Amino acid sequence: MFIGVTGYNHESSAALVDENGVLVDFYREESLSRIKGDKSFPKRSIQKLLITNNLKKKDIERVAFYERPLSAFLHIAKEASLHMPRSLSLLTHQFRNFNRSSVSCYLDFLKFFRGLETKLIYSDHHLSHTLTALAYTNTKKDICSVVVDGFGDRSTASISQIVDPTEINELWECPYPISLGLFYSSITDYLGFAINEGEYKVMGLASFGDSKSNSARLVRGLMDWDSTSNEIISDMSYFDYHLSTSNSFSNKLEELLGPARNPFVRLVPGDSDFQRCADIARGAQDLTIYLLEKIFTHAHKITNSRRFLFSGGVSMNSASIDSLAQLSFVDEIIIPPSPGDAGCAIGAAFYCYIKSNYYSDFNISKPSLFPSRKEIRNDEFITEQIVSNEFSVLQRDEDDAFLKAAELIAEGEVIGTVLSSSETGPRALGNRSLLCDGKNKEAVENLNNVIKNRSPFRPTAPAMRYEIAQKYYRLRPEIYECYKSMSATCKCFEENVSLEFPTTHVDGTARVQIVENNSSLDKLLSILEPMGIEILANSSLNVSGDPTCFDLVDGLMVCSRTKLRYLLTDIGLLKRKK
Amino acid sequence: MKKSQSELNVFYETAHAELASALEMLAACKVTESPKQAFGYFMHAKDEYNHARSFFEMLSKRGKRASIEIARDFRFTPPSLITKGYISKKGFLIETMNLKDFIAFVYTNELLAKSSFENILILVGHSTHESRRISSIMADELRHHGMAKKFFLNHYPDLQPWQLMIYRTKETIHNKGRKIYDANLKFLDRLLTPLYRAIAYLAGTMAMKLNLNEFKRKGKNLMNISSSSIL
């Protein structure tokens, strides 16, 4: 058995791969600690992997950490040192927190899982991303990997040629501090949203912006692609993320774009500052698409490949994937369901597996979108009193519960789901979702505004079968796999009724989920379609600011804290009493 | 400006504390083997979540009026629950304490929380919507304190009232100790900052001379790089 681990810099997680190359289990630390974006050493995740799979430490052959800790530390310190004394606060912070950085990974293993520290190995950060993405392809050879994120352990973007899983040659890199990911995060911060959490909001906001506006044009000029040297270039004087712990952008950016937005003021379409913010977001989105197209074009040029893996935090920018699929040389783009740092644990676990089977045959199985093993613990027993006091059980039998849930959806209700295993990635694909009729405007508004309290400019994703999606949306076969994990948006057909759906964004796009066969949503849709409901609006089951629900207790808590009334679970369909 | 900043700080820290309490109770709910206890912890967690939301709303109301520079410092990011020490790095209390100590902790701290809210009540002024909410939160805390006491006495009937008193005194001293430690740490931090900066400057001067180019990966098979190297 092989364990992959991420942590310290971004969301921490742990993955387990068995000796047959199968991803057996995967947990994000935030799911267990309930602290969104938890980046502490993933001790709960590792513990859970061991307990759930009945493993002892001696059963673990190797453990891989997803990056080279000292490299990450030194690259940041070296860059900051070039800008002293301005960067002194960052340097002080770096050196004072040296023992809390990923360098302490070994010591944390020693402290919490004594014995495993001797089995610890290290993978390159971007290699972990690449191997995660590679696991999700059908063929594991002759493909190009593009990784674009904020910062890895040495670069911020890279292109590699995968000959086979034992030969992955890096051909191009974008050195720190120039970073498309950190640029997008800086704009997120400038617009008053939290870094590593608000990037989705910027993407949603961009649809309201005008590419021709002055603000968008100014943002568009902050970075560029140098066709002579094939490098990303940027005027770093607009950014402070490489110099400061508290500011990601400099005063110069405020001089250019106007004052940053107060994070406590809610951004509502029609408000005085809304259009300026939307235009800035538009500029950031346009620049992201432009640079990604350049990176992919360069990747094709140097590898001749027509098939691409795309991972790293920037690949979560689902609004840019449709444009990439339209590049003439692209035959296929694969994005793993968890393309950010949390998903790297999967790649790190596969790194151990490949390293251990280097000279023999090995096989990497394509992981499920729902890999976590079901809780062994008896949820029904432990939640007995919570359910009996706070909820009514409408239906216990699974089929009856699904039928009743479908009827409620048809009546315009919103249903929460806590079914089977949870999803790998950040997007709820039906097992930990809030669902309602995707064509019922009132129900979608209820889900968005009353239950989730989401920003009014963020759309909700529609989920449906492939045959239904073909009627309404311009799907691209090159990114078919991406639709299964909601990793790409697509455009509605012109003059199509889908433009009026409440799940369609203001720019006529939607982040469609193509439902997998034999999934919970597939089962629900098979009951709903004869009732005339072919599209479900699907959002993650959580309260704003919290991680997506993990177990039944979390689901019951969301129901109790919000106006959600119904919960479809493995123990039946529940209705909140009060 | 300083007043507004300190006011924001009160709501910011209290919201953190309440949210951390909610997570502690939720964790307790998940590890207990008794459905009855699970229900008790669940309801307690729900109350604490609601309290946290109230304080976040009060923070938000004041944050809107603050300057952007100040407001940005009081944005909530969930991992700060750990970095600020509201949730221990070692784990949740239920994971690190025995049940008796955990209940004693809840029993004592609910009462201490109630008394700290009295100061916030003064801050928001009496007879306001916010003061009514805080009064209601104080009532909740008193109820939680009573429930913890009941639980404690039910499960440990041999305990004498004076023993409960000892638990309370011990925890009060712990709390005061934590505050003194925190204040000292901040004082020490201010005192030592110039030294830290001087060390960072020296280390930075050395880092400047580092040549990291030889660790570049361009043209290399990434699978062939040593897996034991941390650089």
Image (cartoon, helix red, strand yellow):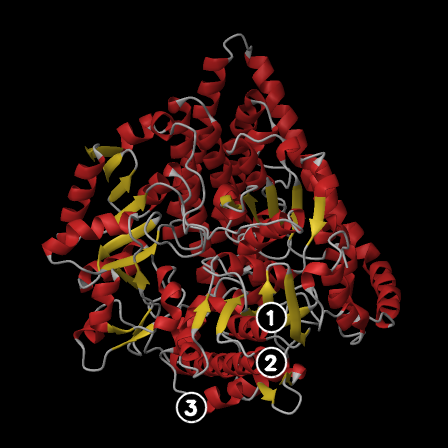
Query: Which callout, 1 or 3, points to the residue nearer the camera?
Result: 1
The answer to whether the residues at label 1 and label 3 have Cβ atoms under 8 Å apart is no
Residue B13, position in %: x, y?
Answer: 56, 50
Nearer mark to the viewer, of 2 and 3: 2
Answer with the quarter of the image where residue A385 lies. Answer: top left
Horizontal arrangement in the rendering, residue A374 relative to residue A183 (left or right): left
Q: Chain of mark 1?
A: A
Q: Is residue A308 left or right of residue B199?
A: left
Residue A101 seen in this snapshot: no
- Compared to residue A5, the image places residue A489 above or below, namely below
Q: Chain of mark 3?
A: A
Amino acid type of the residue tagged 3 in the rendering: Ser
Disc 2 and disc 1 in contact, CB within 8 angstroms? yes
Report the front residue among A429 and A34.
A429
Name the residue that disc number 3 marks.
Answer: A213
Q: Quadrant of residue A574?
A: top left
For label 2, the residue is A302
Query: Considering the numbered disc 1 on the image, is that residue within a helix, a strand or a loop?
Result: strand
Q: Is residue A119 visible?
A: yes
* Disc 2 secondary structure class: helix
> Of callouts 2 and 3, which one flags the residue occurring earlier in the amino acid sequence?
3
Q: Would you name the residue on which mark 1 appears?
A: A161
Q: Is residue A109 above or below residue A153?
A: above
Image location (x, y in percent) of residue A506:
29, 76
Q: Are marks 2 and 3 in contact (CB under 8 Å)?
A: no
Crowdedness near tag 1: few (<14), some (14–19) or many (≥20) residues, C-alpha within 10 Å:
many
